Image: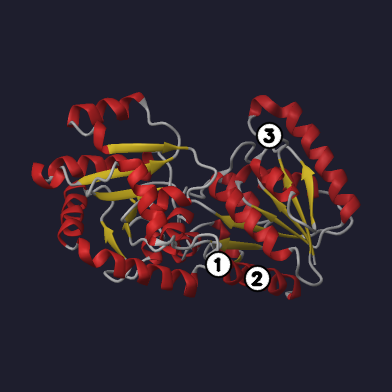
Amino acid sequence: MKLLLTNFHDGDGGGHTTYLASLAKGLAPRREVSVCVAAPPGSRLLREAGAIPGVATLAQPFPNGLRRLGAIRRAREALAAHLREHAYDLIHVNGSADHRLVLAAMRRLPRRPRLLLTKHNSKPMQGIGHWWRARRTDQVIAVSDFTRRALANTAYARCRLATVHNGIDTDYYAPWPADRARAERDARFADSPALVLGSNAGTADYKGWMDLVEAIALIPAAQREQVRVLLAGRPPSAGSLARMDALGLRGQVHFAGLLDDVRPMIAAIDAGFVLSWDVETISFACREMMAMGKPVLVSDYAGLPENIRLGVDGWVTPVRDVPGIAAAIQMLLEQRATLPAMGEAARAHALEEFGIDRFVDGTEAVYRELLAAE
C-alpha cells in the first residue's frame, strides 16, 4: 500500500499535526506500507515527519484563496508531477485546502488513487464546493461518533463513512511520580493548597476557558480563593485580560505559554477541562490529560462527551452554561478527595481505548477495506 498523507497548515498545525505525525509513525514500520507526508515548507508536520524513520516527505504548499491563483496553479502542477511519478494507491487529505488541490492535481492521472478525507472539526460541510468534492471522494473518516452522524446529513453521505477516534501515546502521556508532580506544582503555585484546574487545549476563545473564569467569579468568595487555573497556549487577548481584571481573578489564572512538552503543566493540575463551544470534535488535549491520570470536565459539545465515563473519570456540563460550570467547580471542591481515584480511572480508560496502536490499526483497516472494495 503506497500512501500519501497531506496537510495544509503551514505553521504548528495543532491537532492535525499530532494526528498525522502519529499516524505516519505508527504506519511506517508495518509490512507492505509505504508512507509519504506532504505539508508546506517550514511546517511543524514536515519537520516532525522528516524525523520519522521510513517516512518520505514532500515540501508541498497548499495555497488557498482567489488572490493566490498563480500560487495555486504552480502548487497544483508540482503536486500533479509528483503524483504521476509515484503512483499512490491512496491519498489521505485532512482539510479543504489540501482536498481541493489534490483533486485538481489528480486530473488526467493514468491511474486514479483512492481518496480519503478525515473530518477533524465541527464546521459545516455544506455548499457547492463540498458537493463537488464529495462526488470525487471515496471515504471519510470521522474522529468521533458525533461527527459521523453529522456527515450522514451532508453530501458526504454518498461516501463510505467510518469512525476512528484519535489516539495518543499513552507511554509518553503517563502519570508522573507523586513527588515529581508535587515539585512541578509547587514551582508554579508556591505551596498553595488550592484546587488547580488546567487545560492544554489552548487559549482560543472557542475553547471555553473564559467560561470557566466567569464561572469561578460566580462562586462564593471563600471557595473562589481555593481555585487556581493553569493554561497552556498562546498569550490571551487584551480583552480577556481586561475581563479577568474586572472580575478580580487575574492573579488566579496562570498562563504557561506555548509548550513543546505539556506534561509538566498537566502533572501540576488536579483536574483538567475542555469546555469548547465551536470547531472541536474529540480533543487530543482531553485524552492527553486523562492518560496522565487527570479526570476532565468537558462541555457537551460535539464528540467531547465520548471521552468521558460520567462520574467515573470525568464530568460533562452543558455548552456555555456558566452557572452549570460554577456548580461543577463547587462539586470538585467538595469532592476533592475523590479526584486521585478518578484520575486512576481516567488512566485506565486511556490505556483501554485511547492508545496509538488502536488508532493506527483502525485507520489501516479503513484503508485496506477501501482498497479492497470495487
Give the total of numbered labels: 3
The amino acid on which the numbered mark 1 sits, given as a three-letter code, is Val
Q: Nearer the viewer, residue 337 or 64?
A: 337
Above or below, comparing residue 276 to residue 315 in the picture: above
Residue shown at the point (16%, 40%) measured from the top left? 217
Please say whether residue 208 is visible from this viewpoint. Answer: no
Residue beneath disc 1: 164
Cβ–Cβ under 8 Å for marks 1 and 2: yes
The mark that comes first in sequence, 1 or 2, is 1
Identify the mark at residue 63; answer none if there is no mark. Answer: 3
Residue beneath disc 2: 366
Tell me the CA gap for discs 1 and 2. 9 Å
Quadrant assignment for the N terminus: bottom right
The mark that comes first in sequence, 3 or 1, is 3
- Please tell me whether mark 1 sits on a helix, a strand or a loop: loop
Q: Nearer the viewer, residue 78 or 110?
A: 78
- Please tell me whether mark 3 sits on a helix, a strand or a loop: loop
Residue shown at the point (33%, 37%) measured from the top left? 254
Q: Crowdedness of circle 2 by 10 Å Cα count: few (<14), some, many (20+)?
A: many
Q: Nearer the viewer, residue 101 or 368?
A: 368
Q: Crowdedness of circle 1 by 10 Å Cα count: few (<14), some, many (20+)?
A: many
The amino acid on which the numbered mark 3 sits, given as a three-letter code, is Pro
- Please tell me whether mark 2 sits on a helix, a strand or a loop: helix
Q: Is residue 261 left or right of residue 363?
A: left
Quadrant assignment for the C terminus: bottom right
Please say whether residue 319 is visible from this viewpoint. Answer: yes
Query: Which percent across, then down, holds residue 172?
Result: 55, 60
The amino acid on which the numbered mark 2 sits, given as a three-letter code, is Val
Identify the mark at residue 173; answer none if there is no mark. Answer: none
Query: Which percent across, then down, holds residue 212?
Result: 26, 45
